[in-house]
């Protein structure tokens, strides 16, 4: 992604929710990518997996050059699961 600005916001509401997302390529030339996900009430599972590079078509790493990746995951009040896996150069 080059020079793009993307914001993803989700309010999962009440109930048991699952969120899974990942960055699947490099960020460069001033890209600004933000995730803001809130699980709220219920038993939630929020995950980010940022290791697959579509350009290289491999589980290698993503490059973040002159760009911003902002991840905010808020699971809420119960026995929830939160995971973020990143491999960057």
Image (cartoon, grey):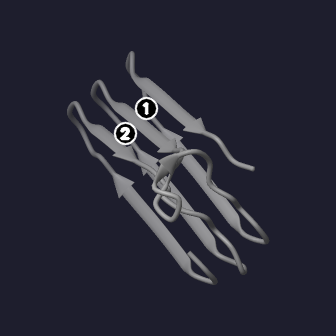
Identify the residue shown where x is 56% and y is 35%.
85
Residue under label 1, please give it: 76
- The residue carrying mark 2 is 39
Decide: marks 2, 1 in contact (CB < 8 A)? Answer: yes
- Rendered view: 84 above or below 12: above
Q: Residue furthest left?
A: 15
Query: Which corner quadrant holds the N terminus?
Result: bottom right
Residue, x 49% and y 49% (percent of image)?
58
Front residue of 47 and 24 = 24
Q: Position of residue 23 (x, y in %)?
A: 50, 56
Q: Which mark is residue 85?
A: none
Seen from the viewer's position, the closer of residues 41 and 22 is 22
* Left or right of 86 on screen, residue 45: left
Corner quadrant of residue 75 = top left
| Of the image marks 2 and 1, the number of the one nearer the N terminus | 2
Whole-angstrom CA distance, mark 2 to mark 1, is 6 Å
Could you say where residue 6 lies in the image, as x and y percent from the top left?
51, 74
Q: What residue is shown at x 38% (from left), y 20% (from top)?
A: 78
């Amino acid at each position: 992604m080059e020079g793009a600005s993307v914001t993803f916001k989700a309010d999962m509401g009440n109930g048991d929710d699952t969120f899974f997302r990942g960055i699947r390529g490099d960020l460069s030339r001033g890209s600004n990518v933000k995730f803001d996900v809130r699980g709220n009430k219920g038993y939630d599972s929020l995950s980010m997996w940022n290791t697959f590079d579509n350009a290289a078509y491999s589980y290698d790493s993503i490059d973040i050059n002159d760009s911003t990746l902002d991840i905010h995951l808020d699971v809420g009040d119960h026995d929830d699961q939160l995971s973020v896996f990143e491999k960057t150069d």
